[in-house]
Amino acid sequence: MANQPAIDPMEQFVVHKLVDLPPLHVGSLVIDMSITNSVASMIAGALILVAFFALAARREIVPNRGQAVAEALYNIIDRMLVRPILGEAGRPYVPYLFTLFLVILVLNLMSVLLAVFNVAGLNFTFAVTSQLAVTATLAVLTFFSVFILGFVKHGPKFLGLFFPSGMGVIGAILMAPIEMLSYFVRPVTLALRLFGNMLGGHVVMSLFGSFVVALGLLGLSGGIASLALVPSAFSFALIVALTGLELVVAVLQAFVFAALATVYLNEVVNFGHGH
Amino acid sequence: MATETQETTAPADGGGGLPQFDAQWWPGQIVWFLIIFATMLVFVRVFAAPRVGDTIEARADKISGDIADARRLKDEAEAQAAAAAAETAQARAAAQRLAAEARAKAQAEVSARLAEEEAKLAEKGAVAEARIAKARDAAMANVAAIAADAAGAIVGKLTGRAASTAELTAARGS
């Protein structure tokens, strides 16, 4: 029992340095720019995206499989989100939403799919999207881009967003703080939703993975302990099912993030049309 | 192995909290993520989105264009078929008219020839009739002379005296 690996589902989220790089000095701030396992995963994800589109984004009238996948991904943003929600006015925002969707999607999928290579002590996967630092960056970036765009396009009138029409003066004054609160909580929910989903999924997978190994080792010690092989096998079956579920969650969370970003954009692009 | 890692990283975790809340790694991750996200944004905006989007649009245009072409060709073919049918009808009418004309012409020729022949025959008939009438007149004249002679002879035999020519002529006239 002494040489059994400890069950620590959080260990997979620990960031550590791979390559030391000189830090960046911004004013009095010192930013450690070393390549960590997190950064390496981000770069790998970006390279996967570039390689995929370089190969798949062909201009054939009859698409091959890769091109069909690339077009299906594009249509998720263009046909399912931008056109129905934003309309023609949303066309300029397609690249940003597409990037958002692709980056989250590739990082989510990588963290689940590349786990097959995690054998013999090697650790290829790192769930970048389960790092709050990253999801918060994405959420804040998206939220404030939209917020600033609102002021650029509509000026101070954009503050009308916080004053629901038809409430009267007193009603508006009462409602404004609530509206503001519900508005500015958006980046928090955006960041926590993605973070929580990826964190939870990976913790559960890691736990059941640990059960497979721990109970399996116990079962192999012979005697009555052999019974432990049964829950070990059960855990293994469960982990297969969980992997499927996590793949769905990976795609769904990328879609949800992009969909919410589109909905928030809609308040800016079609400001005053649905209020 | 894993136990050792946990021992070395445990103090950095801030004592049992989520490793994600270790502020030491936040600035680096944020800056790197922003750099990578910006790169991806440029890549998608310049390459991926226009390439994929334009291809989808080009395909939609091609399909609708092909359908329009097919519809136009079909209309053209139908118009040509209608023109051909009209031409055929016209040609048939012309042929019928030509045939009728030819028939009428032949008919006219035949009747003209018929009339000509009939006139010729009528003329011949008239000449023959005239000759017959002349011959009959001549014969009739001879008959009168013979009758007068016979009458004179009869009168001479009966009366013993010859009748004068004037008497004979008068007798014949009654």
Image (tube, rainbow, N blue to C red):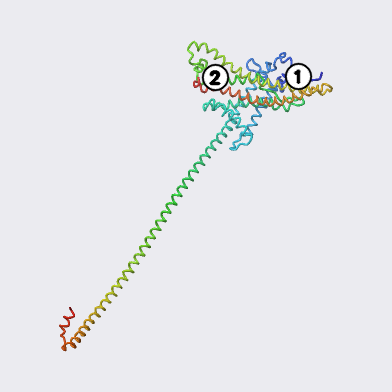
x, y percent for residue A77 = 58, 28
Element type where label 1 sits in the image:
loop
Q: Is residue B64 above or below residue A153?
A: below
* Labels 1 and 2 positioned on one and the same chain: yes
Location of residue A72 (image quadrant) = top right
Camera-side residue: B36 or A257? A257
What number is the disc on residue A150?
A: none
The residue indicated by pointer 1 is A7
- Whether residue A148 sits left or right of residue B36 in the image: it is left
Comparing marks 1 and 2, which lies closer to the viewer?
A: 1
Q: Is residue B65 above or below residue A171?
A: below
At horizontal 72% and vertical 28% (from top left) the residue drawn is: A116
x, y percent for residue B145 = 21, 83
Camera-side residue: B139 or A51? B139
Marker count (numbered): 2
x, y percent for residue A24 = 65, 19
Chain letter behind tag 2:
A
**Labels 1 & 2 near each other (Cβ < 8 A):** no
Camera-side residue: A111 or A154? A111
Q: Which of the two labelled residues, at mark 1 and mark 2, occupies the earlier sequence position?
A: 1
At horizontal 32% and vertical 71% (from top left) the residue drawn is: B121
Q: Is residue B119 above or below residue A161?
A: below
Chain letter behind tag 1:
A
The residue indicated by pointer 2 is A148
Q: Amino acid at mark 1?
A: Ile
Q: Amino acid at mark 2?
A: Ile
Q: Residue furthest right?
A: A223
Q: CA distance from mark 1 to mark 2?
A: 46 Å
Location of residue A139 (image quadrant) = top right
- Circle 1 packing at 10 Å, graded few (<14), some (14-19), many (20+), is some
